Structures are given as structure tokens and as C-alpha cells.
Image: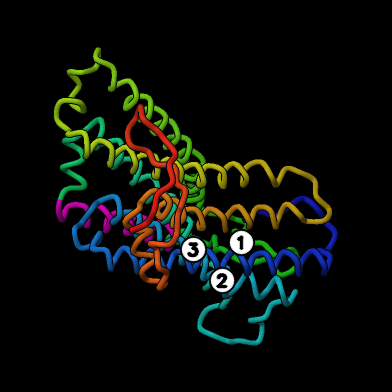
Amino acid sequence: MSASNGSNPVLPGIRLAGAASYLLINVVSLLLSIFLAVVLWKSGDLKSKRTFFIIIVQHLISDMMSEMVQLTLVVPATFAGYNIYEDIVLFYDLPHLIAFFDTVAYNGQLYFSFLLTINRFSVFIFPKLNVLLFTGKRVYVTIALVWFIIAVFVILTNVGGCRKSFNFEKFYLWHDCVKDISQFLWFMKMWGSYTSTYFPAIMMVMYIALIAYTRLSNFKVFANFSWNSQVNSKRRKREFSMLIQSFLICVCLEIQNISFLSLPKIKDDLHIITFVQNWIVLLSSFMNPLVVFIFNGDLRTNLFMLLGVRSSKIQVAVTRFVGPSDTRSQGTLSQ
């Protein structure tokens, strides 16, 4: 989260209202994330090694990590209006330690969104790449490699002298970097800047291309394309549904990225922009489990069972994507 341009202190009323909104969104988002994790495990989607859900779980871990940072640092500090950890002496400054996991969480969301995009792209366009990276146990090797890259980047950036911290006067997370940065730290900062800026843009272009491709592949002129000839109708509908879910998750990340680039440029003496930016971050984590529940009827049914809700009496209106050229809304009676 970046600072807004205002120089005045944050008014107590705005600070408390912002903290209350953070708490509400965080609790709802964390509950949804926990429900999704439990439902995925109970439904057997993890056990059956469905690549889409395996990658979604990595994104979910990052979301929950971000939510815990909010609940242990951002929310209580914004409510209190001062450094609540000032008197706690540990081997490492506690606010910096908590904020460290925010950097891990953001990069987890970014890299696994990118990995999910590569997975969707390879399923439709490059099946050999899909087999190489995402088939069987290979998907776990790919995921482990991504976590390794994230760990190396975050640890080396911190060791190099650029740590995530929290401003207890303006109430936002920021990167506290040494003034005289080394060439190595400059490279790491540029890498972080480029990935956070260009990864979402690349993902958007890839998803737009994929959606256009799947729609065009319905016409007879494209009947000889491998997607039409090798994949049966039922699987194609399922893959397209997962494509739409991945696209929506990517859109949330892109909105977050655009807000980081544009909103700090707005002059704001009341510091409303700071709170708006954090709302966008919170809603981005909130959207991941929400999108998955909306598009997967079996997971919704398992959620109702988990909550003890008699789903036979609940009618849920959903938009169901049944294929690239057939999108329809219907009332679905849960079973």
C-alpha cells in the first residue's frame, strides 16, 4: 500500500471508520478463505490433483497470509492510532516481521496468478507445455519452484536493505529502504517493480486472447483446430469455466496494480486514498474464494453441508458458463 499525498494527520473519525471497515472485510474474507480450504479438502478436489484447484490453493494461502497481516498489524494499529508493538522486544522488530509476510503474500498472489494464467494458456494452446509443467506430480515441482523464487526474492530484498514496514502516523504499509542502495538491491527493486507492473498486463492480454480463441474455435472454419478435435464437449465446458474464473481473479489483481500506480498521485489531505487502496487489497483477497464458490456448484453444495444449511430449500440464482458461445442465467436448486 502506498501513501497518499496529504501532509495533515489522519482525523480520528476517518481512522476509526477505516479500521472498522478493514475489520469487517477481513473477517468475512478470512471466513470465506477458510470455508473454501475446508470444502476443497472435503470434496476431494485436492486428492484428485486437479491442477486448477491445486494452484488456487496456493493463491488461497497467500490470501490468508495477507489477511492475517491485516488482522495482526494494520487493523489494531489503525484502531489504536499508535505503535502497539513498541514495548515488545524480540530478536526482530515485530512490525517489520509481520509486514515481511505481507510481501510474501503479495508476491504469492502475483506469481500464482501468473502460473494459473500459464496453466490455462497451455491447456488451450500448448498442450505439450501443459503436460510438462502441470501433469501428475509435475505440478507440485512447478509450485515448489514458484515458492522458491518468491522466497529468494523476498529474503534477498530484505537482506539487501529494503524491508516492508508500517507507518503508524498515516497507517499504510510501505517499503522502508536504505538511502544508499547497492547495485544488487537496485536490481531486486527493479525486478519487483517490473513483475508487479507487467505480469498483470501480460495476464490480461493472454486471457483476452484465450477467450477470443475459444469463441472463434466454435465456428466451422476452425473445426480442425486441436481444441475442437481432441477435447470432448464436457471437458471443454469445464475448462472454459475455469478460464473465466482465472480471468476474474486476474482482473482483481490488475485493479489492485492500477490503484498502486495511479491513486498515490492524487492530492488528498484527508488520507482517504490510503484507505481506498487498502480496501482494494482486501477485496482482491475476498474475490478469490467468492469467484470459486460462484462458479462451482458442487463446492457450493459442500459449503451448505459444512454450514449445516438445508440446501434443498435454498434457491440460488447463478450465471453459468456452459461453453464459449452459450452463456445463460438460470435459477439453480441446490441438491
- Return the disc, 1 or 3, that comes first in the chain's sequence: 3
**Whole-percent x, y for residue 249 in the image:** 45, 47
Q: Is residue 149 magenta?
A: yes
In the rendered view, does 229 fall on the left or right side of 163? left
Spot the residue most to the top: 221
Question: What is the distance, in whole Å, between disc 3 and disc 2 at their CAs?
Answer: 10 Å
Query: Split into 4 quadrants, where in the image is the C terminus?
Result: bottom left
In the picture, measured across the screen, residue 196 lies left or right of residue 219, that is: right
Residue type at the position of mark 1: Asp
- Report the amino acid beneath label 2: His
Residue type for callout 3: Asn
User: In the image, which residues are magenta?
Assistant: 136-155
Q: Nearer the viewer, residue 264 or 289?
A: 289
Residue 178: within the magenta?
no
Left or right of residue 273, residue 193 in this image:
left
Q: Are marks 2 and 1 in contact (CB under 8 Å)?
A: yes
Reply above or below: 140 against 128.
below
Name the residue rendered at 17%, 34% in the picture.
232
Quarter occupied by the N terminus: bottom right
Q: Which residue is mark 1?
A: 176
Q: What's the mark number on residue 96?
A: 2
